[in-house]
Amino acid sequence: MAGRRIRDHCRDRGPVDPALHQHTSEEQVMGTENKTVAVIGAAGKMGQRVSNNLVKSDFRVLFSENSPQGQELIRGLGRELTDSDEAAKQADVLILAVPDVVLGKVSELLVPLMKPGAVLLTLDPAAAYAGLLTRRDDVHNAVAHPCHPSVFLERTTKEEYADTFGGIAAPQEVVAAFEGPDASVQPLAEAVIRTMYAPVVDVHWVTVKQLAVLEPTLVETIACMVGALLTEALHETVHTVGVPEAAARAMLLGHTQVALANTLKGDNPFSDACLIAMDYGRESIVKDDWKKVFEDDELDKVITRMLRIKEIKR
């Protein structure tokens, strides 16, 4: 019931009640105080983010970092370092918070050391989709990527407004994939995912390929590209046309909110004149065959480019 209440409370309607979120989290991680979670790459951006939440939980957390500068940072946070080999041997859930381009090599070194029944958890689907991760029949594989706080999330505190990425104060949802011999291990993976990305509204379970379609195709190839395009358009408006920046920025930010609300939520209809201008924009800017990015070959193409590899391993 608590899980249902927190989802209903959060979905684009309002902030999370901190007490309600705490209650739900405790339910999710009940009985996990004897479980060990290891973070490989604990000094990186994502390594620090997930570690900052894991240290607040009942999990026993091990921190591993390869670079001397990163090791100094971890010690400065008052956290004890564990050799990566030893962390892999002890972990019930081994989190690889390292760059995508080295995930294959790191998994090759550490997966053979993991204990049977453990979970290898990565934070992006590209390497898993590309077949770069070392696998074992007795080790589970999970991938979990944060959705980040919704553009429609109602924020009420300074902390929520400041948390645009998620994992600190603003609630977010997570999309994850799980593969392995024992489905009963999945709740442990979800407990870790909810903890490291907290506060979490819900975890949506999909396949690795579906997660790869979401990230990068839907959100990086399309959504992030559109965000960059808006920034370029703002620059042209100010520096080429000569519109005062404050006026241009105010107009763009307000209309971006309206555009998203109208198209994604159906809040208000666009005017007839606006629809004509939108058609002109599509004709002038968008290629007719743009939906090809959802084809398997195109997904393979972008992921091989991202990972700097020659081909996807099937």
Image (cartoon, rainbow, N blue to C red):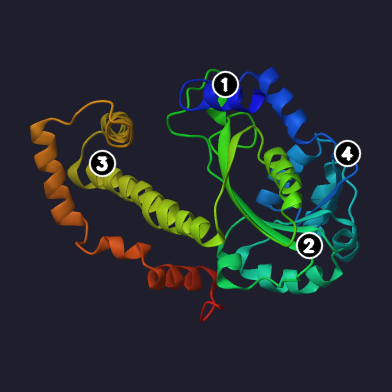
Q: Residue at x 83, y 52 (%)?
A: 63
Q: In which quarter of the image is residue 244?
A: top left
How far apart in space, not on screen, are marks 3 and 2 (Cα)? 43 Å
State which mark lies toward you, 2 or 1.
1
Q: Mark 3 or 2 closer to N-term?
A: 2
**Type of amino acid under label 4:** Glu
Label 1: how many residues lie within 10 Å, few (<14), some (14-19) or many (20+)?
Answer: few
Q: Mark 3 or 1 closer to N-term?
A: 1
Q: Mark 3 or 4 closer to N-term?
A: 4
Q: Can residue 149 be seen in this view?
A: yes
How far apart in space, not on screen, are marks 4 and 2 (Cα)? 29 Å
Q: Quadrant of residue 59?
A: top right
State which mark lies toward you, 3 or 1.
1
**Type of amino acid under label 3:** Val
Q: Which residue is drawn at 64% across and 37% down?
A: 167
Which residue matches tag 3? 238
**Type of amino acid under label 1:** Lys
Label 4: how many residues lie within 10 Å, few (<14), some (14-19) or many (20+)?
Answer: few
Is residue 171 placed above or below 109 in the rendered structure? above
Horizontal and vertical percent for residue 229? 32, 50
Is residue 310 placed above or below 215 in the rendered structure? below
Horizontal and vertical percent for residue 216? 47, 58
Q: Mark 1 or 4 closer to N-term?
A: 4
Q: Do the residues labelled 3 and 4 touch (CB within 8 Å)?
A: no
**Type of amino acid under label 2:** Ser
Element at label 3: helix
State which mark lies toward you, 1 or 4.
4
Q: Do the residues labelled 2 and 1 touch (CB within 8 Å)?
A: no
